[in-house]
Amino acid sequence: MARRDTDVANINKEVKMSVVINSNSAATVANNNLSRSNNMLQNSLNRLSSGMKIVNPSDDAGGLAVSMKLTATINRTAAVNTNIANAQSFLQTQDGAYETASKVLDRISELKILSQDVTKNDTDIANYNTEFLELQDQLEKISEEKFNDVSLFTSAATVTTLGVATNEAGEGDVNITQGNLAEELDDVIGTAATSLDDPTIDQITTAIEDLATLRATNGAQSNRLTFASEMLTTNGENLEAANSRIIDVDVAQESTKLARYNVLVQAGASMLTQANSSSQVALQLLG
């Protein structure tokens, strides 16, 4: 009796696996699987060909949003670093002017001493004075120097500064001093100093000391900008690394996925062919 029940159950199973023409569920399932595998294969190809993990926003919407903010921050950081480099060039040009002015003052102090030599006649002293007046003119020209049409030195009564941002938010200013070079040299090149007899050695020495202070200030500001640039460079590198982990594809990992999807697509295509050919049984029965 039990054997008969088993036979009936087997017959029912066979009845369920009927041969039909209008429907082919096996082919439908195989086609869906093939479509999914093919989509994954195309996505993998896109990632490998572009080098990007996020090709479409749908790949990782949240990651894309974070990446866009990181990219903007990276670009701002690079821009600030460029501004700092330009400010460094400004300071280097300014220091060059200070150095040249210092050399001119050294020569003026030398001329002052030479002109006091009792063995020099009036012609000799006049020659020294001619050179002094020329050097005066050169000091005035130095005090008017500019960098990209921005004055290296101020002509205002008080010292002015140029603010240089040191972070990507546009904050943390380093103030570059625009010293009043003409005022510092007033005793040497001012209207009161019309000949080599006018400025005293003390006045010339004081002007040299003032220039030394200005150069020291320039060097301190340049040094601070150097460290600020190093910090920005480090921040930029770390931001690049963080952004890369979000958007850059891992070629080794994605290549492994590509091989898997290739196999799935090939297997899906083969199974779809098999599923489609199963309907030929109905034609054989009809024939």
Image (cartoon, rainbow, N blue to C red):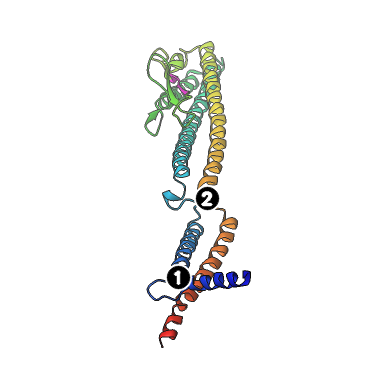
Q: What amino acid type is highlighted by mark number 1?
A: Ala
- Residue 238, given in percent of the width and then of the height, sits at 56, 39
Specify the segment rendered in magenta: 175-181
Could you tell me which secondary element the residue under label 1 belongs to? helix
Location of mark 2 (residue): 248
Q: How many residues crowd around disc 1 within 10 Å: few (fewer than 14), some, or many (20 or more)? A: some
Placement of the C terminus among the 4 image quadrants: bottom left
> CB atoms at circles 1 and 2 under 8 Å apart?
no
Find the residue positioned furthest to the bottom. 287
Residue 177: say if magenta.
Answer: yes
Could you tell me which secondary element the residue under label 2 belongs to? loop
Q: Is residue 241 left or right of residue 135?
A: right
Q: Nearer the viewer, residue 136 or 89?
A: 89
Q: What amino acid type is highlighted by mark number 2?
A: Asp
Residue 202, compared with residue 80, is above or below; it is above
User: Residue drawn at (40%, 21%), measured in percent from left and top?
Assistant: 154
Q: Is residue 226 left or right of residue 65?
A: right
Residue 85, compared with residue 121, is above or below; it is below
Q: Which of the 4 image quarters holds residue 145?
A: top left
Placement of the N terminus among the 4 image quadrants: bottom right
